[in-house]
Amino acid sequence: MYRLLFVVITLLSVNLSIANTVTGTHGAVSTRSQIASDVGIAILEQGGNAADAAVAVGFALAVAYPSAGNIGGGGFFVLRMADGEVITLDARETAPLAASRDMYLDADGEVNRRLSMSTALSTGVPGSVAGLLALLERYGTLSREQVLEPAIRLAETGFELNEDLARQFTQNLRRMGSFPASIEIFSKNGTSYLAGDRWVQSDLAATLQRISDSGRDGFYAGRTADLLVAEMERNNGLISHADLIAYQPVWREAIHGTYRGYDIWSMPPASSGGVLLVQMLNMLEPHEIAEPGWGSQQASHLMIEAQKRAYADRARHLGDADFYPVPVAQLIGKGYAGQRFADFDPSSAKPSADIFAGSWPDEGTQTTHYSIMDSEGNAISVTTTLNSGYGNKMVVTDAGFLLNNEMGDFTPKVNTAGGYGLMGEEANLIAPGKRMLSSMTPTIVSEDGVNVLITGSPGGATIINTVFHVVVNFIDHRMGIADAVASPRFHHQWQPDSVRFEDGAFNTGVQRQLEAMGHSQVRSAGFGLGDANSISYDGETFTATSDPRNAGGASSY
Ligand code: DON
């Protein structure tokens, strides 16, 4: 009965076409998948709140956006509730108990990146399911069965693949060669799926049903856990039953900063996102951004110089704060930003101080961000990931879900670039049970106690800078959310000493001016930076926008 009602509600009231920017007065959801956004709105319409919708969307993305929506990975949640309470939930993966500091080094002490990215050894203990269920338990109003129902139905009955997903499957197929369960799911007996094909995921439906029936035991114990551990054993991975049972998501205090009168709420360690975002905004605040204007040499130079300094601090100071003393309060203080930016020279670039080599990642379909606001004034900002798109490409046989390769985000060796060319020192070395440092930056901005913006993004190292751009566009340049998200961005991560930009990120001539000031390697990124599915609220209307760089969709009502 409930199931029928749900289908009817969905069909009657949700705009089923793909929408990049939509408005509504009751609530809004923006995700990388129109199907998942529509699930979120259906839950809100049914009387659920933003937490219920966030959980339903999280599970729906695991079905409809397998590249990064997941139950085999991890993620972060930032909540600002109608009563003003702000809290975050850290559902980041942890290193298995059998992990060790030097596990990716070969006999010569060199880093073996294949091990840390493309094998069963790259998988951290998944956190997503525990996180979603903890969120539901603490802030949700609907039952577990209700919020899982849309995802189970979607996996069971399938859905029509769009061009975007069909292309992704084909691209990833060649890297799934050694994993028969992956080939089985992402192809028709080895032949590519085409747009328009119906895609059914029966094993995943059964796994989701076990979670619906038994809660966290449906994933971290019983059949699902047995299947996951068996997959690890077949492929020499480390995750054991003891790891799964021990996994706990952690509620943490949000990173809080202020910027030109707005409150900024974001993710603390194990992400570096919130700390760096607030640090960069603090460095900018004493300077004029709005007046020289978007894309100007002055504004671009300021932002690049802030990015360099913040990312250098990331390498030195950021890691899992449960394992390493991260000086969070100092790093996000206005005083520290003043000192750190004291050597800012408006007329010339400061070369990145160090010489460690980093490499630039290809942008892809990894990681995903979604934003939800409801009519009560609750806002939830969520970024989840398997790390690489489709994680380590390994589907757990008979359980139907992909495993992450998040262990690649640890620093494999001091002063060596880890994932995304990001440098690291002691703070982010591997230890059993430790969370690998993330850049995910789910963020909420409030003004006079009202949530006015939710944003976040995928993009590896570029994530924090994408969020930085959206916030500066929104606050300094007074852009509407669609423009704040769509406007071209640029990225500097300290090492390598290089600015990568999306075409159009600078006004005419500014690239040359930046080079003349000493900015080195000012180059086109060659790919879109980020996917910031965001929502703004002006006190009356929610405006949800899915990043036009990708084929996501927003819904509202
Ligand atoms: O947690 C992190 O920072 C990375 N594992 C995120 C990976 C990512 O965003 C890949 N994106 N396109």
Image (cartoon, helix red, strand yellow):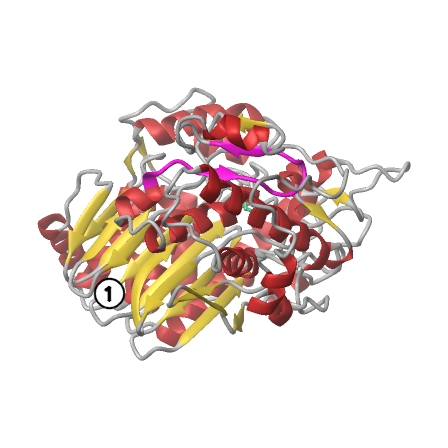
Residue in view at x 50 percent, y 64 percent: 130
> Is residue 210 something one can see in this rendering?
no
Q: In which of the image's four quarters is ligand 1 placed?
A: top right
Q: Nearer the viewer, residue 116 or 226?
A: 116
Where is residue 26 shown, x and y percent of the image?
16, 63
Whether the magenta-drawn stretch holds residue 497 is answered as yes
Report the residue that reaches farthest toward the front: 347
Whether the magenta-drawn stretch holds residue 495 is answered as yes
Q: Which residue matches tag 1?
A: 374
Asked where in the image residue 341 lies, by quadrant, the reply is: bottom right
Asked where in the image residue 140 lies, by quadrant, the reply is: bottom left
Residue in view at x 27 percent, y 44 percent: 482
Q: Above or below — where is 392 with respect to 167?
A: below
Residue in view at x 45 percent, y 24 percent: 170
Q: Amino acid at mark 1?
A: Asp
Report the residue that reaches farthest toward the left: 12
Where is residue 337 shown, x and y percent of the image?
59, 62
Tell me if mark 1 has few (under 14), some (14-19) or many (20+) residues whose alpha carbon lies within 10 angstroms of its own.
many
What SS does tag 1 mark? loop
Residue in view at x 44 percent, y 40 percent: 530
Q: Nearer the viewer, residue 377 or 256?
A: 256
Q: Which residues are magenta?
A: 486-501
Q: Tell me which secondary structure the magenta stretch mostly adopts.
A: loop
